[in-house]
Image (cartoon, helix red, strand yellow):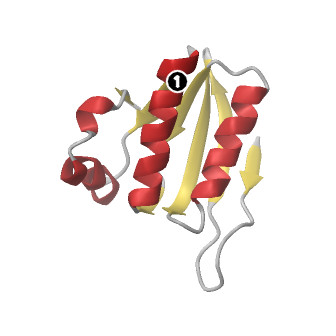
């Protein structure tokens, strides 16, 4: 299943979001940039999956080329939301520029990082 997010600002690339089931989890795999103009699309997709009954969500960042602090904030909010509401939320680490955001902000130890 694949979803294309249409909410991007003029001049920016569209963020594509692919979904697939993996064993007992649903993977959300954005491709492109997660920034202030696209973060809502990722959040909305995670919310729809949770509302449809998914209890194990994985955010796969391997095809994300750039992520700003709005993407980091989203991941931290979903991690806390999962803890508070009893579902699983994990992150597959992205390429070095994306992973560096976690390092620079000192939050890698607060995330449930999962191997690809």
- Residue at image location 43% in from the left, 49% down from the top: 73
Q: Secondary structure at mark 1?
A: helix
Identify residue for label 1: 82
Quarter the N terminus occupies: top right
Quarter the C terminus occupies: top left
Picture quadrant where residue 38 is located: bottom right
Q: Is residue 101 above or below residue 82?
A: below
Q: Is residue 42 above or below residue 6?
A: above
**In the picture provided, is 108 more to the left or to the right than 26?**
left
Q: Position of residue 51 (x, y in %)?
A: 76, 28
- Residue at image location 65% in from the left, 38% down from the top: 46
Q: Position of residue 84 (x, y in %)?
A: 51, 20
Q: Nearer the viewer, residue 36 or 96?
A: 36
Residue 88 in view here? no
Q: Is residue 44 above or below residue 26?
A: below
Q: Tag 1: Cα neighbours inside 10 Å, few (<14), some, or many (≥20)? A: some
- Residue at image location 24% in from the left, 31% down from the top: 109
Number of numbered tags placed on the structure image = 1
Q: Position of residue 107 (x, y in %)?
A: 26, 40
Q: Position of residue 50 (x, y in %)?
A: 70, 28
**In the picture provided, is 114 more to the left or to the right than 7?**
left
**In the picture provided, is 90 more to the left or to the right than 109?**
right
Residue 100 in view here? yes
């Amino acid at each position: 299943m694949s979803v294309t997010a249409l909410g991007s600002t003029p001049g920016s690339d569209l963020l594509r979001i692919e979904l697939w089931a993996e064993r007992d989890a649903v993977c959300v795999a954005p491709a492109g940039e997660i920034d202030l103009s696209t973060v809502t699309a990722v959040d909305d997709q995670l919310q729809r999956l949770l509302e449809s009954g998914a209890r194990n969500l994985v955010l796969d960042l391997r095809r994300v080329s750039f992520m700003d602090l709005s993407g980091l904030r989203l991941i931290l909010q979903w991690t806390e939301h999962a803890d508070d509401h009893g579902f699983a939320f994990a992150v597959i680490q992205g390429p070095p520029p994306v992973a560096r955001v976690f390092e620079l902000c000192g939050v890698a130890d607060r995330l449930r990082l999962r191997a690809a």
